[in-house]
Structure formats: C-alpha cells, structure tokens
Amino acid sequence: MDYVFIFIAENVFLFSPVIALYFFHKAPGGTKFDIATFAFFSLPLTFILSLVAKELYFNPLPFVVGGFEPLIPQDPSNGFPSDHTLLLAAIASIFTFVYKNKRVALVLWIITLLVGAARMYVGVHHFLDIAGAILIALVSAYTVHAVMLWRKRV
C-alpha cells in the first residue's frame, strides 16, 4: 500500500497541469483569454502569499518532529505551505472561478486532495501544510475573481 501513496505523492501532481492545458486548449477563444488573464494574476499572487506565509510561520516537517524516515526523500525544511498542494490548488482554483465545466474543476480538486493526503501519509507534510496551501490558493483566486468582477462593473 505504501507504494500507491508514494506514487501519488511523487507523480500524480503532474496530471493537473496536463489536464488544465488540455481543457485550456479545448476552450473557446473568450474562455481561453479569461483563463489566461486569471492565471496571469492569480498564480503570482498565490506564490507571493506563500512566500509571506513561509516567513510568518515555520512548521517543521513530520519526519523531523517525529524522528522517523519518510517514505520519500525530502529536505528537512519548512513544510508550510505544501508547494505541491499549493500549485495544484492554484490550478484547480483557476478552473473553479473561470471554466464553465465544473466537472473539470472537481477533477482538479480531487487530484489536489489526493496528492495532499498522500504527502501526509508518506510523512513529508502535516495537515496544516496542506490546508494552508489550499487556503492561500483560494484566497488568491477569490481576490483576483473579485477584482475582475469589479473591473467589469466599472
């Protein structure tokens, strides 16, 4: 069973960008523009907020605190927020707020949660690292969404 979680923790995160690019390519021109514009603002904001969060909160990784060997190699650094989960949640957030087919967003969120859970299982993140990454991505996406709606009204 460990091998399944190791595979998910190390490899499944690659599925989200591939799925996102496929549906971006498949989208009509106006939707492509909206996705690209949203991503242009949302992704850097997510990254900046994650850097601020890393500076404000230090959360040693579970294997450092627990004194055990994780199932996958990991440097003993700040685990907050989880970078893998942050990227996946940022991608899922873009499709949640912009893409009309909500099943695509749901699949991207399932992948995000699977990878986050697997990274906890293999011992390289705490729940707080995963939840924090998701929250940062959602706050960033919501902020960009609100600004874009406000700009359309002005």
Image (cartoon, rainbow, N blue to C red):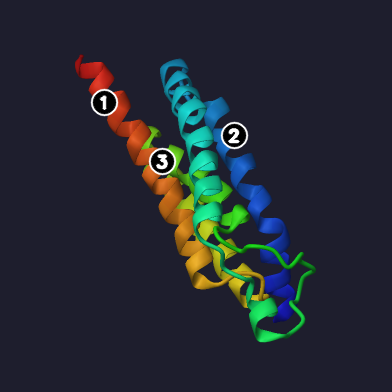
Which residue is at a point 51% across and 61% down the rendered structure image?
57
Residue at mark 2: 22
Query: Is any atom of residue 50 visible in this view?
Result: yes
Residue 154, by quadrant, is top left
Looking at the picture, tell me which residue is in the foreground, 21 or 52: 52
Separation (CA) of disc 1 from disc 3: 14 Å
Q: Position of residue 48 (x, y in %)?
A: 52, 39
Q: Residue lying farthest front? A: 56
Residue 78, by quadrant, is bottom right
Where disc 3 sits, the SS reads: helix
- Amino acid type, callout 3: Ser
Examine the rendered structure and indicate whether residue 149 appears above or below residue 137.
Answer: above
- Amino acid type, callout 2: Tyr
Q: Position of residue 86 (x, y in %)?
A: 54, 51
Examine the rendered structure and indicate whether residue 36 appears above or below residue 145.
Answer: above
Seen in the image, is 129 located left or right of residue 64? Answer: left
Q: State how many labels appear.
A: 3
Which residue is at a point 37% across and 45% down the rendered structure image?
139
- Amino acid type, callout 1: Leu
Looking at the picture, tell me which residue is in the foreground, 67 or 95: 67
Which residue is at a point 50% across and 24% down the rendered structure image?
36
Residue at mark 1: 149
Where disc 1 sits, the SS reads: helix
Q: Earlier in the sequence, mark 1 or mark 3?
A: 3
Q: Position of residue 117 (x, y in %)?
A: 55, 70
Mark 1 and mark 3 in contact? Answer it, CB < 8 Å: no
Separation (CA) of disc 2 from disc 3: 23 Å
Structural crowding at the residue carrying mark 3, measured as other residues with C-alpha within 10 Å and reported as few (<14), some (14–19) or many (≥20): many
Residue at mark 3: 140
Looking at the picture, tell me which residue is in the foreground, 122 or 140: 140
